Image: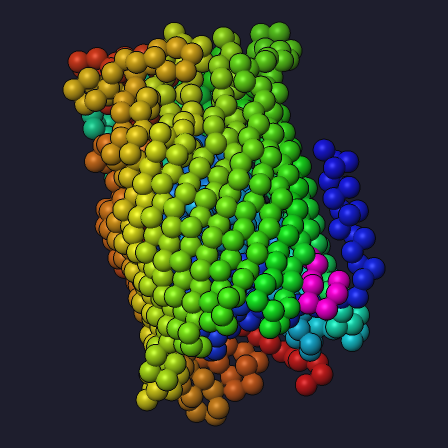
Amino acid sequence: MKARYLLCCAAAATAWTMPARAQDAPAADGVRAGPAGIIVTARKRQESILNVPVVEAVVSAETLENHQIVDLHALTSFVPGIKMGNSVLTIGTQISLRGVGTTSLDAGIDQSVSLNIDGLQLSQGLAYQSGFFDLAQAEVLKGPQALFFGKSSPGGVIALTTADPGKEWEAIGRASYEFQARQRRGELMLSGPLTDTFGVRLAGMLSKEDGWFKNPATAAPGLGGANPKYDRINPSKNWIMRGTAVYEPSPAFRARLKVNFTHDRAEGGGSPQVSSCPDGIGAPSGVPFFNPNEDCKYDRTHYLVDFSPAAFPLALNGGTPFLDLDQHFGTLEMVARLTDGVTATSTSGYYKAKSSTFINSTSGGYAASLLYTDNRFRRRDLTQEFRIESDFGESPVNFLAGLFYQDGQVYNRITAGGNTALRLPALLASGEHNLSIDSVSLFGQLRWKPVPVLEIAGGARWTSEQRSDRPTLINAAAGGYLPVTPPTPKISSRNWSPELTATYTPTDDFTLFASLKQAYKSGSFTITNPQTRPVSDNSFGDERVRGAEVGIKARAFDRALFVNLAGYYYRYKGLQVGATEPTDPTGPSGGLPITRTLNAGSAEVYGADFDAAFRPAGIEGLMLNAALNWNHARFLKLENVPCYGGQTIAAGCVITPIGTGVAPVQDLSGIPLVRAPEWQATFGFGYEMPVGSGMTLSLGNSNEYSSRYLAGLGRRRDLYQRAYIKVNGYLALKAANESWELSLVGNNLNNKLTSGNKLTSNFANSVILFGQQTGTNGAGPAGVDEILTFDEPGRQVFLKLTLRPFAFGK
């Protein structure tokens, strides 16, 4: 694999003996330029957002700074159609666009919505936690994207462009304080030219917070728990360092190197909150796992105890749950003009992640949980893309051709430890997975203009991908390793992803476009569970989509109004969804929870996107904006999904063969997709006005509305997130020469608590104890599964100071 990667790199490098021409940097400030003036890279070339035949939302650097958008979750307040969910261990952030996303609690699955950072395509959930920092622009491309962003993405792409060095030296220092979580954050950027042909940019960020949710839990004596070390959930410390170097020796050649180092440390491990207890907070087994003060409501108070080292001798970090994550990644992009009108681009990518996690597996808030889980994860990806593209000016025909290669290695070790104070073994189960990914794709496109106002573009990506898993079962008794061979140790897929678009631009102020698209995502292996005996099949199949979009983009009223309107229809097959089986003490897992990734039979997604921006001619400095997404997303066929614990026959649970055994399952055909509200809207304004001594006062508002949506897979009412509105705003005062700026930012000012991810399990019984019946006429003495909710912050209030002390060369 490595040899093939090096061969691709060598082939790309031979192109740089030819004369070349550099690309211009993307526009960073869409707010000042007006929405139609935004330059996007949706087709990996610079185009006006007015002319590109893609449904796309762009958030400019100015908007990111004004609203203190420092992570992906905050994008939901500006881009209707996008929803996110938190998770535990190495699953990371789960993103959905138009309801299409990944719901499986599995580190081995690729996200259906991929992340692209400076040309590096990422699909593992941990990568989405790298944070927003020193960005030039964020683009959200909705719908399947198969041609231009490395690997095919069935749900869409979030493309981030970080800032490059400019033509003059600048220094930026920024400090902020958030009052609710007591977050302290500092940023420092130094950028400029070292020579006429070589520029650098160094940027760093350090953040530390105490945690947004409170934890007043106390541990019950003698039951394995310890009073929590911290009185808030997930106090954290994060830092990011980024270096950029741009070399442009002539108008014929440009090279850009981006190198990133990130570190995230959170105490508490990201445990979710108990939000629904159908049977109350009683103790079916006689052991009080729920705290006596637990109200089973989603609020700012969690009850989570730490683990006593005496009862959990193998527990890490002194028994305090934690998440520790290091990520190193970067790209080397080289752009050259091979001949007049033909440009070649090479993008070499590297990604490495290392994570160690230890969690309170069943959210014990009084007695310690019966078990904990620790997780050691590593991932390394090498990618190489090489493409050639023409721009022949007045010629009616242009082309794009390219090659993409990925070599990926994933290691995941999962250990479940037991509560010896409650007579469980110190080690319950442990296992490793070694997942290999080898992917090659060829892609190309022809663009034809039969007349100057009409472009017809057709292209396709052919992908061949192989994945293999080598699991190992760690023998707890002997302390040895037992390599096991699953029924499906290797999977292969070969797929075509064609795309056809037509773009009609009769004037500079109007575009009509239509597209036919098809995309796919490879199957993989579930690597979150230790392998069991008898050996189970942990593979799952490909995810595919095909459909169409049609839309218009227009400017009116002397270009003061910019409007987008688009409709879409897509049909998905094999959509990869996640489910957790009820624990079975007699099963091969010995009563431990089993996470599965299933392929849905089919799903249907259709709807409409609308957005508008208006700059009134009579009010200088004012910008109004609004956006709306109506989305109908349903599973047409979703059968043989594991029932939730305690689900009865009357509630739709039946005994049907599934996988290698017999398990209680249900038919969920017809339910909405997870994180797929029918209506989402954003609206707000931005206004700048001069005040005394040449200073500028800025103020703005953004509002987010969402109708209710499923946050977990199932038909239970308590799996829904209720409809809500969130209100955001900012106020800023800036010096005449922009040497300083002081701002006050409020996000979710009305303090709505929301979630994009919920799960079910028998937490009152610490998940693995007896007494629950599933697929019968009654739930049994252990009752029905409780709901755990993965939280998102409520109100956030930031005070921020930005300094630009000097600008050499001015």
| Relative depth, front residue between 186 and 165 | 165
In the picture, residue 592 is in which quadrant?
A: top left
- Is residue 132 at all visible to an observer of this figure? no
Find the residue positioned furthest to the right.
17
State whether residue 315 is above or below residue 587.
below
Classify residue 254 as left or right of residue 43. Answer: right
Residue 391 x, y percent position in the rendering = 63, 66
- Is residue 355 at all visible to an observer of this figure? yes
| Relative depth, front residue between 336 and 238 | 336
Residue 772 x, y percent position in the rendering = 27, 15
Q: Quadrant of the N terminus?
A: top right
Q: Which region shows up in magenta? A: 338-345
Q: Residue at x 38, y 38 (%)?
A: 572
Residue 760 x, y percent position in the rendering = 32, 29
Q: Residue at x 48, y 39 (%)?
A: 520
State whether residue 689 is above or below residue 634.
below
Q: Say how the picture is coloured.
A: rainbow
Classify residue 422 as left or right of residue 783. Answer: right
| Relative depth, front residue between 635 and 474 | 635
Q: Residue at x 49, y 64 (%)?
A: 455
Residue 149 x, y percent position in the rendering = 56, 51
Q: Residue at x 48, y 81 (%)?
A: 734
Classify residue 797 as left or right of residue 330. Answer: left
Q: Quadrant of the C terminus?
A: bottom right
Most common SS among magenta residues: strand
State whether residue 462 is above or below residue 727.
above
Find the residue positioned furthest to the front.
450
State how many labels appear: 0
